[in-house]
Every structure is written in C-alpha cells, then in structure tokens.
Image: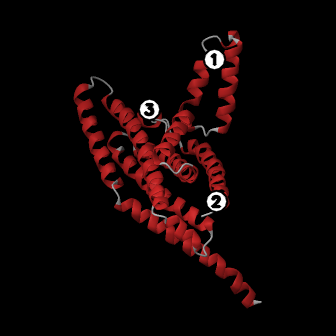
Amino acid sequence: MHADASRAVQPLRFFWKILFGIARLTWMESARNRLPGALLLLIGLGWGLAAFLEEAAVTETVQTQSAILAALFRLAAVFLVSVATIAGSAREFQDRLVELLLALPIPRSAHFLGKLLGYALAACGVALLFGAALLPFAPVQQVVLWTLSLASELLLMVALGLVLILTLPQVPLALTVAMGFYLLARSIGALILMAAGPLPGHLSTAGQWEVALLTALSWLLPGLEQFTPTAWLVYHTGHWQDLLPILRETAIYLFFIVSIGLFDLYRKNF
C-alpha cells in the first residue's frame, strides 16, 4: 500500500519540481534583461512629468498628476510585460531551447505553466513598482487596489502573450495582435456607445448590425475597461469589494487562455 502511494506521488513531485524550476529560470531571465532598467526609466520620466504638472497646473494638481501617471504607468506596464513575454519566449524558439526541453521526458504542461508562473511573477513585480511610484499622489489603500487590479490585467496579458507566440512565432505580429486585443477589450464599451449614437432607437440597419456585432464581441472579450480605473486614484472611490468582479473575470479568462495554450502546445510536433 505504501509502495503504491509512493509511486503515485513521485510523478507529481517531478511535475512540480520541473514547473518551479522553469518558473525560477524564467523569472531570473526577466530580472536580468532590460526590463528593470526600462521600469526605472519610466518611473523617473513619470515623476519628472509630475513635477512639471505641479508647476503648470493651476488647480487640482495632485488629481491631475495621479490621473496622468496612472494612465501612463498602466499602458507602459502592459506594453513592457507583453514585450518581455513575447520576445523572451520567441528567443527560446529561435535558439531551439523549447525543442530541446520538450524532447526530454517532462510534461509539456509543466513547461507551459512554469513559463506562465515565471512571467506572472515578473508582471506582479512590474505592478508593484508602478504602484509604489504612485504612493506620493494617492492614499495607500487606493494605490493597493489599483496595483492589485493592474497585476490582474498583466496576468491576462502574460497568458495571452504565451499563447500568441505558440501560434504566431513572429514577434512583431504577435505583439501587434496582443496590443490590438488589449485596446479592443479596453475600449469595447465606448465603441458600442459610439455605434449606438445619440438616438439608439433610430439606428439604420447597418448601425443595428454594428451594435449587435460589437455587443457579441464584448461577450467574448474580458471587460478590461473595468480594470485599474483611474478614478480610484483621483477621487478615492475604490473599495475592496470592487476587486471581486475583477478577480473573478481574471480567473475565468486566465483559465480559458491557458486551456487554449495547453491544447495548442500538445498538438504541436517538435
């Protein structure tokens, strides 16, 4: 009985050992590349912009600073994390390191989930640094909420980047699709309102089809317009319960994207 239990546990231990080993190597690679330097440069530029706004703004200086820095840091975080994930994974494909690893007797799921965990840790570090840079401009609780929401947003982009590089090995194409996905998911609500127009009841047939198409698309995309709202930092309206729908949507779409990535990885012949 004990021998059977030991034999059942050994493959599981091997799986987790491989997963955490790949995650550690991935995180170390992200820490050694130019990502930390780019983060520090952007934070310095952001603080310089905040100092300029302090001199230029007449009223609501802190609110203006927090709003502009929040938008700047959010877009910068998404772009840097996407570039780090896609470029780092593409480099492994070009060096045939992925083929070497997958030729070994290790589960492919351990490799994919290990890469996901490693880049997810790097993404959380990016969110923490940008959140810490906002502490002089907003209350601590609002910054913590904003940082957790940004980390959730970055986790989705990490998973999407890994899936895209499996499907689209070219870095520019994969990065373009990732940024297009992000911008569309971020603005789908505004696009529906624009398509509906000021008089939704008097739309033409083409306008009705546009609204229906955009609405159907919004059901497939994550509602990123609800993630990382700038209003939390400007008007201090964030509450802990506001994170629940964000975390729930992150978990659902993360499971969906990871499932697609694992399916695509297992069907490939290396």
Quadrant (top left/top right/bottom left/bottom right) for the C terminus? bottom right
Earlier sequence position, callout 2 versus callout 3: 3
**Image height check: is 162 above or below 4?**
above
Mark yes or no: residue 124 visible. no
Q: Label 1 neighbourhood size at 10 Å, few (<14), some (14-19), many (20+)?
A: some
Q: Residues within 10 Å of mark 2 (few under 14, many from 20)?
A: few
In the displayed structure image, the side of residue 130 where residue 116 appears, left or right: right
Q: Give whichever of discs 3 and 1 has the lower sequence position.
A: 1
Mark 3 residue element: helix
Instruction: State which quadrant residue 30 falls in.
Output: bottom left
Which residue is drawn at the image coordinates 69% and 86% (left, top)? 6
Q: Amino acid at mark 3?
A: Tyr
* Camera-nearest label, 1 or 2: 2
Residue 41 in view here: yes
Rounded to the nearest angstrom, the CA distance separating label 2 from label 3 is 49 Å
In this view, 61 is above or below 18: above
User: Which residue is pictured at 62% across the width and 50% down the height?
Assistant: 257
Counting from the top left corner in percent of width and height, residue 210 is at: 66, 21
Q: Quadrant of residue 79?
A: top left
The residue tagged with tag 2: helix, strand or loop? loop
Q: CA distance from mark 1 to mark 2?
A: 43 Å
The spot of residue 109 in percent (x, y) is 62, 65
Residue 268, numbered circle:
2
Comparing marks 3 and 1, which lies closer to the viewer?
Answer: 1
Alpha-carbon span between mark 3 and mark 1:
29 Å
Between 134 and 177, the one lying in front of the other is 177
Q: What residue is disc 3 on?
A: 235
Q: Quadrant of residue 220?
A: top right
Residue, disc 1: 196
Disc 2 residue type? Lys
Counting from the top left corner in percent of width and height, residue 61 is at 30, 29
